[in-house]
Image: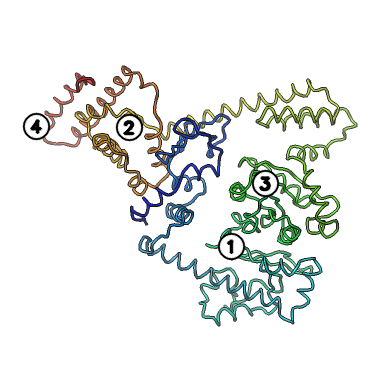
Amino acid sequence: MRYPEHIIETIRERSDIVTLISEYTTLTKKGSSYTGLCPFHNEKTPSFSVSEDKQLYYCFGCGAGGNTVTFLMQKENMTFPEAIKYLAERENIELEEFALSQEEVQKNQKKLLLLEVVKEAAKFFYFTLRDDKNQEIMRYLTDRGVSSEMIKQFGIGYSPSDYNVLYKYLHGKGYADTILIESGLFLKSNKGGFIYDRFTSRIIFPIFDTGKKVIGFGGRVIDESMPKYLNSPENILFSKSHVLYGLNFAKTTTSNYYILVEGYMDVIAMHQAGFTQTVASLGTAFTPSHAKALKRYTKEVVIMYDSDNAGVNATLRAIPILKNEGIKVRVLQLKTGKDPDEYLRQYGKEQLLELIKGAKTDIWFEISRFEIKYDLKIPEQKVMFLQEVASRLSEVLSTIEQAVYIDEICEVYQIESSAFKAEVNNNYKKIRHTYTTKDSQASQKNSRQAVSTEVIFLSTLYHYPHIVKQVKHYINADMFEGDLLKDLAKEIFEAMENQRDINMTYFTTRYPESTDQNIISHIMMHKDERYEEQIILHKMILENVKRLKGNYIGKKMNDTKDAVEKQNLLFQKKDLDKLYIDFING
């Protein structure tokens, strides 16, 4: 499926690549471009460039490149239509139905129908909670300190114990069994084939996307039955690894940090207490997609998972994921209450706020976990503890941040600073050597894969347009390998001759794959400064003209069976060996 070019053109013109990519990495204006650390591979020195004029990006380290659409395809694992749709929604552009394939139209219609179903279900659960028969459930929530305002804001409901009451309600509204099953709200018996409700005898928490549409549900029992929590299954509306509970409300906060907790009740209790920047991963499975979602709204996160082993392990897993997105991390473990909900009920908002203000950085949290493993009264174990701390500290990239931690650690653990600093530096050198070697090898490998001789040649023609006129006398677009390079050569020749811009819309729609967009970006953004020296430039051009035309003649000789044509090609090949291009006089 492809969208018409006029729609792609509108989306491309309105979508600003600098704004989009700035949500993933910090960009600094440098001349006519923006530079920053590559969001596709780990690096310490910025090699990532974004052109506002061309609306392209290119990494000189790993070779990743493309436009706004490609960026979303590579970074968010979107398909081409998904990326176009995302950008259209972002820029408030309506995609006409005729622009979609029949398959895409059907998928959109199904999605809209599923949104209707889950919305109706949410209303059913919400009003069921208020039924006189369910006063015990309402009392449970109020006893937990949940106000009527929070119940309304979060749309909390109840699914009764009747095994198919929701099914009968929605079926009665005319929804087909197939769409009801696909909504994830129902299950089908293998034996009898009857359909029954997935959520029964549970308090229901609707899960919203950032556009405030219900996309799924979480259900919690009020007794000791298992499982305690049950979420909607994955479908085209709901993906657990991408959704953060409460983000639809938190995104309007004015706070300069977000708070990450574990469960529905924690989020609701925190919002009720005024901590409206609180969100939760659904369980403890915090993912890179969650971190990317948070990065769009904040630069700092305070993790407040439970203080049990599962919560500690989840915290340790979440820290590097958040840090990898450039998010500052602090950790607060509540000693006197198992979770934020309980702590607030026992101690109140003000005390919790003071604890949040004093939350440890991720480094100090990890150090506290190391300390548990050792008896620091025993010299040998204290040495091992400090060696482990030094190893961790060597991973901190900022030398200023490193120096601050070194001073603090030496003061707390009474260790001579020069000895500890030397240990940190030794570890840092080992890590840097390993990292640099691997990174260099990976970058060189990726660059070799992405850049061929013909790509370099086309890039040179694009950036040094004054030579195109002379080159066109000897070669043509058909001499290049593959449709993409043929099209690029043809477009560069015509654009340079007519003094116009490259038709980027054509190349966006015709070649949406990331590998092709990498090549396009390399050609348009990689200007080799060596060729500022005219002698070197002319030598390179002449060599490539001879190589391209020689290969082209060789292929034609292999393909033809005509003796006269073959003889003519042989003469052309001999003449090619003597070829000299006068770049001054043409």
In the drawing, does residue 578 fall left or right of residue 10? Answer: left
Residue 372 image point, x, y percent: 83, 40
Identify the disc placed on residue 256. Answer: 3
Mark 2 Cα shell of 10 Å, populated few (<14), some (14-19), many (≥20): many
CA gap, disc 1 and disc 2:
47 Å
CA gap, disc 2 and disc 3:
45 Å
Disc 1 designates what residue? Answer: 212
Mark 1 Cα shell of 10 Å, populated few (<14), some (14-19), many (≥20): few
CA gap, disc 4 and disc 1:
74 Å
At label 4, the amino acid type is Val
Mark 4 Cα shell of 10 Å, populated few (<14), some (14-19), many (≥20): few
Q: Of label 2 and label 3, which has the lower sequence position?
A: 3
Q: Secondary structure at mark 3?
A: loop
Residue 540 image point, x, y percent: 31, 22
State whether residue 21 is above or below residue 148. Answer: above
State whether residue 118 is above or below residue 7. Answer: below
CA gap, disc 1 and disc 3:
22 Å
State whether residue 548 is above or below residue 258. Answer: above
At label 2, the amino acid type is Tyr
Of residue 226 and residue 514, the one placed in the foreground of this image is 514
Q: Of label 1 and label 2, which has the lower sequence position?
A: 1
Of residue 497 and residue 535, the one placed in the foreground of this image is 497
In the drawing, does residue 271 fall left or right of residue 413? Answer: left
Q: Of label 4 and label 2, which has the lower sequence position?
A: 2
Query: Would you say the residues marked 1 and 3 are in contact, meaning their CB atoms lie under 8 Å apart?
Result: no
Identify the disc placed on residue 462. Answer: 2
